[in-house]
Amino acid sequence: MADNKSRKPDWVIAKERAKKASAAETIWLFGLHAVRDALANPAREKLRLVVTKNALDRLGDTAGMEPEITDARVFDKTVGLPPDSVHQGAALEVRPLNWGKLEDVAITGTGLPLMVALDRVTDPHNVGAILRSAEVFGARAVIAPARHTAPETGALAKTASGALERQPYLRIGNLSDALEELKAAGFVTIGLAGETDAELEEVLDLAEGRPVCLVLGAEGPGLREKTRETCDYLARIPFAGQFGSLNVSNAAAVALYAATRRFKSA
């Protein structure tokens, strides 16, 4: 008869299983640009490259990987991509990137002392576009909760147009805790909220050249109450027209540009 005393608690077993499942997780990147940039990234663990003959000719260097050449007519079934994926005949199976700890990236990471935090932004196309803007404007990282925010996917990578391989995208446990950690490291946290009176440029002036984390919420609900309470300031992007709302990825680009101007003029 088994000794019940030696049996691990259910919560320990569940945690171990989740850890194993996470370690085994893979994703398919697709599209020539996304695949080419992932192949060129030495930090990316690459498992399987599937291409059509035409895509292989256009792809060029495969970073030492042996490609599996398949017919374009059966490509979707071979890789298991959704039928509407614009894959251009190239797909690469990889493991998610590990960018390290928040404190290390925030304090000693490359780029300007500028971060972007996302509060339940679930659309991979929006997150991909934000990563692209973050790279263009030199932000150190984009952070988002591991739950209720878009994970690394092929759609996200394609929209990011290569930025996913170069721009740190940290998935954290609790957004409010992460914001508190950044504040303790000297960051000023600024939540974007359309209904507040303070304009973004005014609030950036109050930051007086200190490191900044811009916090953006999902379209519609915006920032959650707890996130609002954690932010040092709330600010809005001023608008001239009657329709005073930007897509979250557009708002991120405008806010990043405004913050970057402050750092360069300081």
Image (spheres, grey):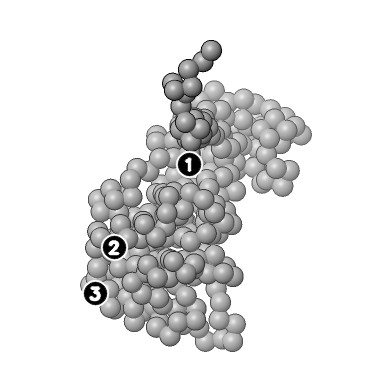
Find the residue positioned furthest to the right.
73
Q: What residue is shown at x 55% (from left), y 73% (from top)? A: 246
2 or 1: tag closer to the N-terminus: 1
Residue 123: percent from left, percent from top: 59, 57
Whether residue 60 is visible here, answered yes or no, is no
**Going by the picture, which residue comes out furthest to the top?**
1
Please state if 43 lies on the left or on the right of 104 as rendered: right
Which one is nearer the viewer's eye here, 86 or 170?
170
- Give the label on residue 37, or none: 1
Report how far apart the C-alphas of labels 2 and 1 lie in the structure. 33 Å
Which residue position holds label 2?
183
User: Which residue does the numbered mark 3 point to in the structure image?
Assistant: 208
Query: Does the image show residue 66?
Result: yes
In the figure, 194 relative to 134: above or below?
Answer: below
Identify the residue at horizontal 44%, vertical 21% (top origin).
Answer: 6
Real-space Cα separation, disc 2 to disc 3, in angstroms: 15 Å
